[in-house]
Amino acid sequence: MKKLLFSSFVFLISFNLTAQDLRLADQYYNSGEYEKAASIYKHLYEAQPNSYYYYGKYIESLLSLDKYAEAEASIREQISKRPSNMELYVSLGNLYERQYMPEKADESYRQAIDNIPPNISVISNLGHAFLRLAKYDMAIEAFQKGSTLIGNEQIFSYSLADLYKRKGDKVNMIKYYIIYAAQNPNQIERHKTQFQRSLTTEEDLEEMRKQLYERIQAEENDEVYLELLEWVFIEKGDYYSAFRQARSLDRKYNEGGLRVKDIGDIAYQSGDYETAIKAFEYISQGKSLNNSLYVDSKRSLLKAKRSKVTRNYNYTQADLDTLQLEYESFIDEFGVNGLTQNLVKEYADFLALYKNDLNSAIKILNQLISLESINNYVKADSKISLADYYLMIGEIWEATLLYSQVEKDFTEEYMGEVARFKNAQLFYFAGNFEWAQEQFNILKSATSRLISNDAIDLSVFIMDNMGLDTTDIPLKMFAEAELLTVQNKYDESFLKLDSINLLYPDHSLVDDILYQKANLYVRLKEYSKAEELYTKVFTDYPEDIRADNSMFLLAEIYENQLERREDAKLLYEKLFIDFSSSTFAVEARKRYRILRGDNLQ
């Protein structure tokens, strides 16, 4: 036992000394003290003759000292001792190359490649020796010849892919990355990440698609090829083809629909509602409430159908009626309970916001909130929506009571901040500006940037417009007009805004009135009138707080409702350049790049 402990102790001391020597040698080498570095590297190599790293650094030190004769003598001595070490021929070739003797250098490099043995370690070391000298073609030749000698196309596939990547040869890079991926099927996500970093253009993705098709035709049961093809379609934005591929894999391997659900979610987020609907319908077929994926997919299906119908506001009453029947059919079959809570909440929102059936929405939300099994966050979200709808029908007391409940239950959380903001906004609508502003000032430090920005905007707005002419009546009238807008009383809101202009023609609210009228015209789908007013706001009042809002909202109308993509692109560009400090600047830059055709990751 003592002898074993002593041996271990000696080994540790030896290891530490070696590590210290190596650090010192590297330090000398990096600082240009090659004589000292060479001495230590030589000592380390003699102690560990199997370490080519030490020997290679020793030779590099000699070459840096222009001691070519000494380096050549040492290399030839090592070749005589270790003729199977092909790296030594690379070192010899490098020595000749440093002396401007290209023919002798090529002869030595050629000797290394021509004499490769069928030994994985030797081949790997040789290939990387060429790689260190940036001789990519020779490294490729070494690895390819080695693969042939060993009889395994896959064995050096990663190294070959990396070499072709360095050369900029995307076709062969893709080829060998695919080979490597097939060799390591359990690391599929890692492979996708590698491809995502390496494939930077649409042409790259198309090349990969072609190569995968060829391999699938030859090996149709290889799951890796099929999954990578699905990934290619997603990267290309071809979500329908990705869905078909995912569906095929799901059926083939009986995966239960999760893969298809993921494609549906991606398609939905990208605005391809048709494909999302197909994906969610596939999962919904033949499933039961006991399958949580089914319930989630059914909810996602109705959400996608709603988004498809309501997108661009170009829906008909018949579209809304059909969607309502689908919601009702699901709820009639499965009821209102913990499993269906999210879908029921969304149905209530649909009734309130699109069918303008506030009473039914309120009834459903009250039923949902009364459930003991409901998730606390869903309950809080439902209370906030319920309060919104009470506000819309004029039940101010009921609304503030519900907002206050959520604020109390979620004091330090996002949901509580939302409730506090809405409660403060309610008091703003009611003309209690001092209390509202106190709450907005507190919310300036909210964790949610959106709430914080909105709180700052309203706080500044109140401060700028309260008591300018020894009266806050114009601001109260404007707040009442905003409340009327929330309550869908558009004609009354227009009258209230016009009254401010008549009674207080020189008031600073003029740009805010234009902005609010533009918002009303958007709700009424009168986009040309909205365009005129938004343009007037940011053209005539570029220094006021509504300017960047108007520009962003008009750009969205150009992009989504009027299909004037070039006009939208110009406005987004102007926004992030001229209003770089705006809260919309980052999103405007992103939208601009998408419209320009950039491939955003």
Image (spheres, rainbow, N blue to C red):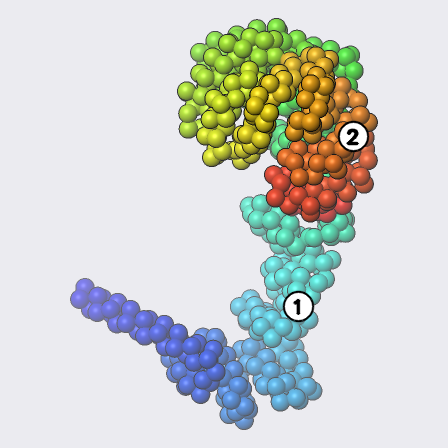
Rendered image quadrant of residue 359: top right
Secondary structure category for the residue under label 2? helix
Residues marked 2 and 1 touching at CB (< 8 Å): no
Q: Return the residue nearer the eye: 83 or 381.
A: 381
Q: Which residue is mark 1?
A: 140
Q: Amino acid at mark 2?
A: Glu
Rendered image quadrant of residue 6: bottom left
Secondary structure category for the residue under label 1? helix
Q: Residue at 66% across / 57% down in the picture? A: 176
Check the picture and name the quadrant holding the N terminus.
Answer: bottom left
Q: Position of residue 349 (x, y in %)?
A: 62, 16
Q: Position of residue 143 (x, y in %)?
A: 63, 67
Q: Is residue 378 visible?
A: no
In this picture, residue 562 sits left or right of residue 248: right
Looking at the image, is 205 positioned above or below residue 383?
below
Q: Amino acid at mark 1?
A: Ile
Q: Residue at 65% across / 17% down in the picture? A: 481
- Label at residue 531: 2
